Amino acid sequence: MDDFERAIMLIYNSAGGSAESNLLLQAIEFCERLKAGPPPTVLRLCLDRLHRSPLVPVQFWCLQSLHDVIRLSYSALDDLPLLRASLLSLFSDRLFPSSSPPFLKNKLAQALAALIRLEYPSPWPSPFLHLLSLLPSPAAVDMFSRLLTALDDDLISQDYHLSSDDVAAATRVKDAMRLQCVPQIAHAWFDIVSLYRSSDPALAAATLDAMRRYIVWIDISLVANDAFLPLLFDLILSHNTPEPLRASSAGCVLAVVSKRMEPHSKLNLLRSLQLNRVLAESELVQKLPALVIGYASEALDCYKRLGSQNEGSSSAMELLEEALPTVFYVMQTCEELDAGNVVELLSDYISTMKMPSQKQIVYVGQMLEVIRGQICYDPTFRDNLDVRDKIGKEQEEQMAEHRKDLFLLFRSVCRVAPDVTQLFIRNLIASALFSSDMTVEEVEAALTLFYRLGETVSEDGMKTGSGLLREMVPLLLSAKFSCHSHRSVALVYLETITRYLKFVQENGQYIPNVLAAFLDERGVHHPNLNVSRRASYLFMRAVKLLKPKLVPFVDTILQSLQDALVQYTSSDWTSKDLKYSGFEDGSHAFEAIGLLIGVEEISPEKQSEYLAALLKPLYGQVEMLLIDAKAEGLEESSPKVMSSQQIIVALNALSKGFSERTVTASRPSIGLMFKQTLDILLQILVTFPNIKPLRNKVTSYLHRMVEILGTMVLPYLPMALNQLLVDSEPKDMVDFLVLINQVICKFGTSLESMLEEIFPTIASRVFLIPASEPLPSGHGINTEEIRELQELQRISYAFIHVMVTHDLSSVLLAPNSRGYLDAIMQLLLLTSCSHKDLLVRKMCVQIFVKLIKDWCSNDAGEEKVPGFRGFIINKFAPSCCLYSVLDKSFDFRDANTLILFGEIILAQKVMYEKFGDDFIAYFISNGLLAAQCPQDSAEQYYQHLQGNDNKAFKSFYQSLIENLRQQQNGSLVFR
């Protein structure tokens, strides 16, 4: 063993970690230097060692290097005859031993395929003829099949090679092979398979696998003939055929079936195959599902291409429907089947139906059974799905993805055969109720199909109970399945009831059944926490829809929910299960009750009684918390604090059932109760100023009180707003500004004095953020903090916008606020010109327009806000209305840009209306003309500005800007 071989062996053995790092690096560098040498030298080295070295790693390194030289440095090779002869000799007189690893033989095949790509048919016309002459020795057959496979992988297959060079080379090689040797190759395939089917079935299978790849482009008659097809079917049907050889034979028949051709020819081919010989063998088709599906798909394709009126189409449909029972069978029995292909086939078949025949109705029923089977969960994961652990979640996600196409197919079936579908589901539900044989998975699947059926029923059909629904929905409402305790069954049961509530809305006699389903152990009282919480949410939705009809049942409902409500407010919310419960935390039960007792069909006395019974225990617990806090001090993680948060959530949810009219006008006693509750909750802001989750919950409740208490909430706002400003971080300020914006929109100018008091504090927190510079980014920056600052900037502009559009611009001029005015104006100017969010820019332009209207008069007398007029004319007008629009980032093809542009047009109109010639003179001389606008265009601008046609002005100004951009060609520096 010389240095060359030692280096390669060292690299090869390094995979086991046995080589020293320095020696390994030297070996790698040595081999890389050899490979990087002159291509002729590399070629001769590799050929020499291939003939001399018995070491497999050395042989593979040489073949890999040869392959690379042929692909990458072919033009630099000077001894091509030697290369051709040497490669052919490795295929013939110097064959690798049969014990050589497959990867070595495959690499040799790849090297020869690469050379054929470059040289066949000219200057090297003979490789295939030479290799054919070596057949049918087993070693030669093996290498020939590997060569054909490598040639298809690396060149011919259209699945991988789409470049123009690849296509040209593949076309050249295929055309030459067709003319020279394809018939001989096909004849050789037949002889090889016939010869080795018994003595060496693996070799026969490899030959057929290679042949399958070529059927797509060779003359079909070379394979689909009276000699080859009987051989292939004999291999498929014979009980003595090894499974790999049977599968390879079926693959070739599938390639024949899938061959692209004119539909009449394809139909004749499908008829001639007599595939019913295979379809009749149930054990056989389980092993060959792809052939069954492929055959059926091609028959359907023939039908569609021939057209339903063509005489051949009925024959194509007969072939398809002859295969359909087998398609259904393999779908139900073959685990390895690609369900996507079958669903596509069945969807296409359904699409051909207009008025299904009796025969087709039978197939529809079988199709529904297939869908039912396909959507069933694996019983292995039953317990995982019940507790919804990590494995259970993964199974749900996988099944949701698997079911997507099946549900689309189901919708198509419902559309074509609604009566058949309803009967099928009715029978499933009845079996689930009255038979103990159905599993959890089968019951879940039956209910899921019932749920999905609801997607296809019209609103009128839902209300009246079209078809069998009038029988099925009552059956569902009273159903109690033996496996109802399982989470997946209970959840889909409740979802299905919710889907059909409109039927109950029109058929009030079933309301007791609905209430029982939601409120007994099937719903809110289900032992599984996930189910009971989901039931609370779905019950709330049911109450929203049915509440006028639920009034007679209020006492029953309250009594049924009493223990659930107590459990919610007394639970340990520090436990993991409850702490991370998310949206469905059980509070929807309170919302449902609020919606129910908030209706005016309930007498004022009863309503007050119900509400007091609910509110007093809740705010009583909050009062106890406040007392405990003064006595012992409580932290954020304290169970009492966590519990209080959920109590506030419950109070908030409860209030959603009451309107402002009810609370303030028709039944003010209700308003007094909510005021009393608010008074207690606001004390939390004083007692726990630094416990942010509690503060957030109180803020959320305050939002609700603004909505329903109306002006009754005003006395509480000064204290609440000031307290919310204590120790406020950016995220807290966002929440605060959302609240203050709501308050302004609700009460308008009546808030003027209150806003004047708190505005300086807001401005110091919000408008002193350095928005004139980009927010920091890069390594080490907390992206969550940046996101919060960006959101704060956005909401701060909305705050100013809400103020000025609700006639509160005077707040900016109050003595305590004047010190911030200049900074705010500069910030608004910068934002209106360059903020990346165009809707924020639009908001800022609208703010300026409103301030111009509020603060500027039509004459040049004494200014209401000294300096503002000049700021608008000298700064805002040119910077925002001209330079920012001239910037190439201002894209007129974007919808939001056009909206912003419309506001900029309006701003110019308002400035002209208020400032007249002062604005025009400055804008034209210091704006347009400075931007090299032609004098005549500036005059046209003046004329359009004076006119009343805003649409024409907008069109002209856009054209003017686009012309200026072309003229400037990016040379103008925008300010």
Image (tube, rainbow, N blue to C red):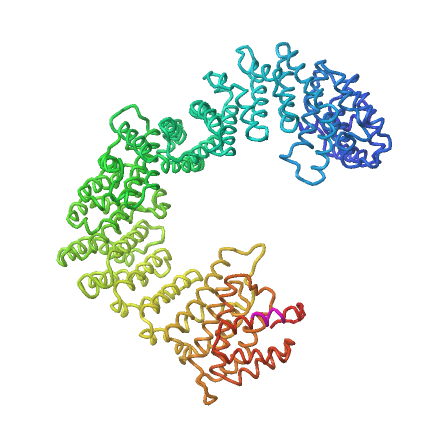
Q: Report the magenta stretch's main SS.
A: helix
Left or right: 805 as drawn, with respect to 677? right
Q: Quadrant of the C terminus?
A: bottom right
The location of residue 450, given as percent across then percent down, is: 32, 36
Q: Quadrant of the N terminus?
A: top right
Locate residue 690: give its quadrant: bottom left
Q: Residue at x 26, y 31 (%)?
A: 481
Residue 274 horizontal/vertical position (percent)? 52, 18
| Viewer can see residue 487 | no
Determine whether 647 is above or below 366 in the image.
below
Residue 397 in the figure: left or right of residue 24: left
Which sits in the foreground, 714 or 25?
714
Rendered image quadrant of residue 697: bottom left
**258 displayed left or right of 484:** right
Magenta-drawn stretch contains 66: no
Q: What segment carries the magenta color?
A: 958-963
Tally of numbered discs:
0
Q: Is residue 117 visible?
A: yes
Nearest the eye: 610 or 146:
146
Give 727 or 246, whichever is nearer the viewer. Answer: 246
**Residue 650 percent coordinates (x, y):** 27, 52
Q: Position of residue 91 (x, y in %)?
A: 76, 20
